[in-house]
Amino acid sequence: MTIPSRQIRAAFDDDTITVYQAYDPAIAEPALAAQTFVPPFKRERMTWIKPSFLWMMYRCGWAAKPGQTRVLAIRISREGFAWALAHSCGSRPAEGETEEAWKARLAGSPVRVQWDPERDVRLERLEHRSIQIGLSGEAVDLYAGQWIAGIEEVTGLARQIGAAVAAGRLGEARELLPIERPFPLDAATAAFVGADQARP
């Protein structure tokens, strides 16, 4: 089966979906201790969550980039994730939407959604895309205050996989990756966020 151009793929169970973020120790360590985000994490800033582990690795360079040396796997409620999608606005106008209408919608939306090229284990771009979700305002408060079911550090895993890739052990690297599956969306939500349906 061909992977749809825009499809949410994630690790999830009946109650939660896992997203990834990378921070410096000053934010990551208090978050791990509290099992939610606490100061110096700033709720006033937009925070981006990523269901794709490999896209997170592309962004943080296998936990090597400054300010992104600690990678966190955050399990959030599927209800919270659904709320975020339902209250989102795309990072560019929808098909047939005027710039003016899009800007008005953007200004009133606490969640930003964009689709970026997915990455392979070498962190090279693929043809299909991965969703990134930016939370601001009310969405950040709900994220840190209600949605988070648990936070786990996966920095060691990130560096282990990165080392295997650097050594050319790609099979080993792929075996270590978290298992991500297509995340089910109803037709209305898929249309709203611009996700594609599976193609045979």
Image (tube, grey):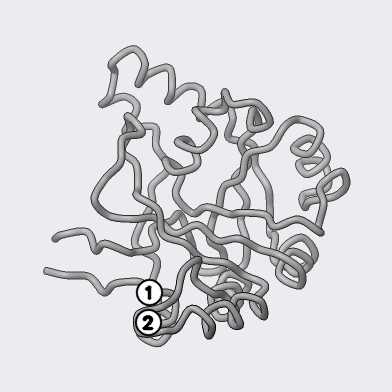
Image marks 2 and 1: residues in contact by CB distance under 8 Å? yes
The disc labelled 1 sits on which kind of residue? Gly
- Alpha-carbon neighbours of circle 1 within 10 Å: few (<14), some, or many (≥20)? some
Q: Relative to the observer, which residue lies in front, 10 or 116?
A: 116
Question: Total number of numbered labels?
Answer: 2
**Would you say 178 lies left or right of 105 here?**
left
Residue 136, position in %: x, y?
71, 65
Query: What numbered label is drawn on residue 191?
Result: 2
Q: Classify 25 as above or below 145.
A: above
Q: Classify 103 as above or below 151.
A: below
Q: Residue at x 79, y 35 (%)?
A: 29
Q: Relative to the observer, which residue lies in front, 2 or 32?
A: 2
Q: Residue at x 33, y 33 (%)?
A: 121
The disc labelled 2 sits on which kind of residue? Ala
Residue 70, position in %: x, y?
65, 31
Query: What numbered label is drawn on residue 74?
Result: none
Quarter of the picture containing the C terminus is bottom left
Query: What numbered label is drawn on residue 194?
Result: 1
